Each structure stands twice: as structure tokens, then as C-alpha cells.
Amino acid sequence: METTRLIELPTCTLTFMEGDVVHAHFKDGMVGTVDALREMFDAISAERNGRKALLMVSFGEKASLTNEARAYASGEESSEHFAADAIIVRDFGHQMSANAFVRVNKPRRPIQLFPDRDTAMAWLLEQRHLIN
């Protein structure tokens, strides 16, 4: 898996990968807010010249999103940036919160939960047709 570029933001690390995939990893102990997500979306948009991306999301220990950030992440604005999301779940508690995001916030793009990076990447690459 070839990495093209890495951007460090205060709450997360963005890794721009092959096949239009961007991996956003929320750092240990960080709580993603609406402002943090806006900063993340802007950085991705600038790097990709406004072109949609396939988003892989992972969370470090005790990292999370606020309820407002989850609502924002599932809204119209985020769908302008992303064609599909793959969320890597690290434990049962995290899986519960990711499931709630999908069921309660109901993003208007394909979202799947995965146990690891490889299966997440494989699924995202199958979604590339959604970008064009």
C-alpha cells in the first residue's frame, strides 16, 4: 500500500493513499469536534483539488467524536467531500458507537464497519466508481 502524502492536524493524521483513499486516524485521547472535522474536510479538499475521496476512518485509544461532530460527519457537507466511508472498529464499545452513527445519523453515502485496515481498503477500492 503506497502512501502519497501525510498531513498532521491537531486531532488527526491524514494519509493520502492509492485509489482515491484518504485515511483519517484520530489520535489517542482526541475528541473530534465540528471545527476539527471542518479543518479535516478542508485539508482533504485542498489536497484533492475538491475531488471526492474514499474515506477510511480509525480511532486511537479513547479517541471519539462529539454528537455534533457525528451529525456534521453524516450531513450534506461531508457528502460533498466523500463518496464512501470505511470505519475501522477496534473494540466492542467503539463498534456500538459506530453502529449508532450509521443508524442514527444515516449518512447519505455507503458506510461500512470493518475489523481491520486491509478489509476496509478492499471495500473502499470497490467503491471507486462512486467518485466519477
Image (tube, helix red, strand yellow):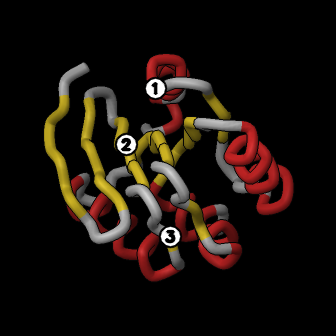
Mark number displayed over residue 117: 1
Name the residue that disc number 3 marks.
32
| SS at badge 2 | strand
- Residue located farthest toward the bottom when viewing the structure as drawn: 35
Q: Could you tell me how far apart the alpha carbons at marks 2 and 3 are, in whole angstroms?
A: 15 Å
Q: Residue at x 29, y 51 (%)?
A: 14
Mark number displayed over residue 23: 2
| SS at badge 1 | helix
Q: Closer to the camera, 49 or 89?
A: 89
Q: Could you tell me how far apart the alpha carbons at marks 1 and 2 are, in whole angstroms?
A: 10 Å
Q: Is residue 56 above or below residue 29?
A: above
Q: Position of residue 73 (x, y in %)?
A: 59, 64
Image-based side of 7 in relation to 29, left or right: left
Q: Position of residue 16 (x, y in %)?
A: 25, 42
Q: Amino acid at mark 3?
A: Gly
First in residue order: circle 1 vs circle 2: 2
Q: Quadrant of the N terminus?
A: top left
Q: Amino acid at mark 1?
A: Arg
First in residue order: circle 3 vs circle 1: 3
Q: Closer to the camera, 80 or 104?
A: 104
Residues under numbered marks 1 and 2 in contact, where contact means CB atoms less than 8 Å apart:
yes
Residues under numbered marks 3 and 1 in contact, where contact means CB atoms less than 8 Å apart:
no
Q: Amino acid at mark 2?
A: His
Q: Is residue 121 above or below residue 52?
A: above
Image-based side of 8 in relation to 129, left or right: left
User: Circle 3: is it few (<14), some (14-19), or many (20+) Cα within 10 Å?
Assistant: many
Q: Could you tell me how far apart the alpha carbons at marks 3 and 1 are, in whole angstroms?
A: 21 Å
Q: Is residue 127 above or below residue 69?
A: above
Q: Residue at x 46, y 63 (%)?
A: 29
Mark number displayed over residue 57: none
| SS at badge 3 | strand
